[in-house]
Image (spheres, grey):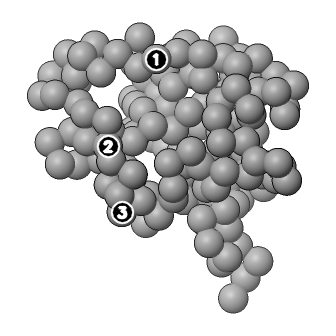
Amino acid sequence: MTEYDAGPVGRVRLALVSSGVGDTVRTFPAGVPTAAAAAEALGCDLAAITNSLIFDLNGEPLLILASGAARVDTKLVAEQLGEGRIRRASPNFVLKHTSQHVGGVAPVGHPEKIRTILDESLQKHELLWAGAGNHNSMFSITYRQLQEITEALELKVR
């Protein structure tokens, strides 16, 4: 067993290290369950927080990586994808597909690859922060690194 085998955060660390990004995970004792709490703890712009939002697209998970300052326009995303209706996923659906709880979902470290959309507005920020698998952990990454390790399609999400 390696140091990266211990649950969701360990799987995120392993994914980051395996991809060449490196282990940039930070843990916060008070927790960072919302984008606003994370921005405050990190001392960064709310828009640099990358929310990992799981949606239900015809029974399949769709991960949208969106700015913490934005609200995803699911109709716009569905139109750009040429797909049907995108619905917010239930907590059980999120856990089933990510092995992570809502509020701590990371862009990586899931049991299976998830189709991913990256909010192109995030590229304005030199450094992004994303959830690292639980309510107490975040990791830093550049926009380009995030796009590469998730193989995300870059779109407008609002």
The CA span between labels 3 and 2 is: 11 Å
Q: Quadrant for the C terminus, please.
A: top left
Crowding at dot 1, Cα within 10 Å, few <14 / some 14-19 / many 20+, comes out as: few
The CA span between labels 1 and 2 is: 15 Å
Q: Residue at x 22, y 48 (%)?
A: 60
Q: Residue at x 74, y 32 (%)?
A: 37
Residue 64 placement (x, y as % from top left): 42, 33
Q: What residue is disc 3 on?
A: 96
Extreme residue toward the bottom, this view: 1
Residue 88: quarter of image = top left
- What amino acid is found at the position of numbered circle 3 in the picture? Lys
Q: Residue at x 65, y 30 (%)?
A: 35
Relative to residue 111, is residue 36 drawn left or right?
A: right
State the residue in front, 43 or 32. 32
The secondary element bearing badge 1 is classed as loop
State the residue in front, 13 or 37. 37
> How many marks do you count on the picture?
3
Q: Quadrant for the N terminus, please.
A: bottom right
Q: Is residue 41 visible?
A: yes
The secondary element bearing badge 3 is classed as helix
The secondary element bearing badge 2 is classed as loop
State the residue in front, 110 or 145. 110
- What amino acid is found at the position of numbered circle 1 in the picture? Arg
Is mark 1 in CB contact (under 8 Å) with mark 3? no
Q: Is residue 62 visible?
A: no
The circle on residue 89 is: 2
Relative to residue 67, is residue 88 drawn left or right?
A: left
Relative to residue 105, is residue 12 drawn left or right?
A: right
Is mark 3 in CB contact (under 8 Å) with mark 2? no
Q: Residue at x 47, y 28 (%)?
A: 118
Q: What residue is disc 1 on?
A: 71
